[in-house]
Image: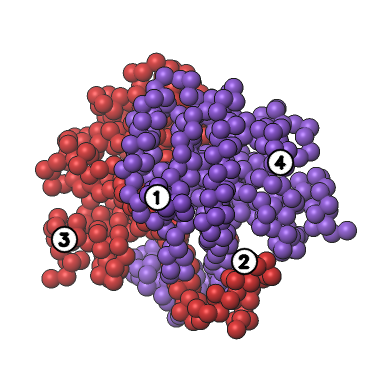
Chain colours: A purple, B red
Amino acid sequence: MTISQSILNGERLALARLLTQVENNTDEGRAALMELFPHTGRAHRIGVTGAPGTGKSSLVNQLALHYRKKEKKRIAIVAVDPSSPFTGGAVLGDRVRMRDLSGDPNVFIRSMASRGSLGGLAQSTANVTQIFDAAGFDIIIVETVGAGQSEVDIARLAHTTLVVEAPGLGDDIQAIKAGILEIADILVVNKADRPGVESAEKALKAMLELAHPTARVFKHHGTYMSVNMPAKKENAALWIPPIQRTVSTEGTGVPELAEAIGRHVDHLRLSGDWALRERARLEVELEALIREGLMNKFRGELAAEAYENVLESVLQRKRSPWEAAGALLNGDVK
Amino acid sequence: MTISQSILNGERLALARLLTQVENNTDEGRAALMELFPHTGRAHRIGVTGAPGTGKSSLVNQLALHYRKKEKKRIAIVAVDPSSPFTGGAVLGDRVRMRDLSGDPNVFIRSMASRGSLGGLAQSTANVTQIFDAAGFDIIIVETVGAGQSEVDIARLAHTTLVVEAPGLGDDIQAIKAGILEIADILVVNKADRPGVESAEKALKAMLELAHPTARVFKHHGTYMSVNMPAKKENAALWIPPIQRTVSTEGTGVPELAEAIGRHVDHLRLSGDWALRERARLEVELEALIREGLMNKFRGELAAEAYENVLESVLQRKRSPWEAAGALLNGDVK
């Protein structure tokens, strides 16, 4: 029996083994990804992001517990840590996360860290979620630490993106929200039992109201594709991010959050945005694979010495990087 | 007179105009970058990074003021905000930053935000620093908001990377430091007048001691290149990141920080790491240009309809993204 068949049969050990293969980008991992691809497309992908200190991890745990106990769903959690690019050590240890969810065969938790290659983590995370999707997990929660590009990658990967805030995290936070708001489908004010929760929520509301009713677009292959259009209540196809208070240490607000997520799924299905997001996600993945393939082919055909000579001429400022790239691409090197 | 000549003559308005051209990736911008490239390679690039709430921006302002007043250096500040990928709105308004530095012709401050394209901001930031370098600025400070990939990009761009921490920013911070430590040349504990400064510094020291004396490597073009080797005091070529306390609102500790930066420059020159970092930076840039060139060529040769057909077959799960990419790369599409 191939590993793909074992995955489709729900074998947990095979799943753990394949995830490692996929993370390490082995031949076996790639072959299985191809075999499993026709079995994907059913899972609901939820992205969870926010600044450090907001309590994202315990919120994700509570949400997973809720889905298990109340909705009997099969849950996969992918905890992505892009902040440790060099060693590959994950911030969130698997063991810590397992406390409330251990022993449940319908919950699978995986921590991932960047292996140093630009864009590699996004691709690797996309592949891991494909495996969980094919393995029959109903909900895949992808959680990232930190702000920045990783959130954009999550927004591209997820059907529903949760942005988690918390009261009293310092002044910069306020400013960062403006950018984060644009990828949020649902806003969560966690640690809502702390002082400052009203002002944090008020600030989020003010920013939501400020947000113009413009389309959120991703640029792909030269064309703009509308992925989400917030504001304007009269149009049923439009989604205004709700704000949900939670206290993740106690589970307060978690059932209501799950309800809001459910409403977002309904919206995605009714508006056709589900299909648009699927398309956008697969198009990004296809483009990344094309880039990788082009670069590998280019490297395979290029003599190492020619590359070294060109790089040396750049270091000596005899040639600009643009001229050097042009020469290499045109085969105009010796 | 071309815009490049105006830049070399120190014309401020031409500089502002060219920065916009370069950010918008216009033909004029690219042409000027090529013309100016032979005039680059003199500036010291300092990266400043750290979590939100650490007071990075005011620290950068104080450092710039110090370099202006005490060392008479010409300073450029590039404030990069990768957290706002969709609108292009920068977190750090130019006006706010200018308060203490305005009117000084030897200080230039530029805020940049991501325009949504993956990797686009890193390239754009690299280009902007090239312009400042050619324009004769002695020190270029590149500051980013947030954690994650943007810090890696800064580490690749900078000769000296400052990682800024502050006491009492929540529990996640502690864990994130472990990853950030690896890109730090100098650790700054800002807001050092606040409670908890001793424990913050103690935690950093403990992590520094834990750090094994292994080489820090970047993978480039298939080979590993050593960029920084911390630990082992007996070897003069090795650099152990010092920890500097500052109170940026008052300027406390800033002269000492500038001294530490100076010692790092001496270390880079003596050890040969300056040249290694220059090489690593230009190699990353060259590789990005090659990738872009390969993709543009590929797109130019591909019929839009063929691409759409292949993408559609992926959406219908008839073909995996890997098979689709392979077919497109081999021209095996109709």
Q: CA distance from mark 1 to mark 4?
A: 33 Å
Question: Which of these two is toward me, A42 or B19?
Answer: A42
Q: Nearer the viewer, mark 2 or mark 4?
A: 4
Looking at the rendered structure, the kind of residue marked 1 is: Glu
The circle drawn on residue A73 is 4
> For the residue labelled by badge 1, is the local secondary structure a helix, a strand or a loop?
loop
Tell me which corner region of the image, top left, top right, bottom left or bottom right, holds residue B124.
Answer: bottom left
Residue B177 higher or lower than A191, as above or below: below
Q: Is residue A322 visible?
A: yes
**Marks 1, 3 in one chain:** no
Which residue appears farthest toward the bottom when viewing the image? B334
Q: Chain of mark 4?
A: A
Who is closer to the viewer here, A263 or B9?
A: A263
Relative to B223, say whether B94 is above or below: above
Q: Secondary structure at mark 3?
A: helix
Q: Which mark is residue B14?
A: 3
Q: Chain of mark 2?
A: B
Label 1 – label 3 distance at C-alpha: 48 Å
Q: CA distance from mark 1 to mark 2?
A: 31 Å
Disc with the residue nearer the chain's start (1 vs 4): 4
Tell me the distance, in whole angstroms, between the alpha carbons under discs 2 and 4: 25 Å
Q: Residues within 10 Å of mark 2 (few under 14, many from 20)?
A: some
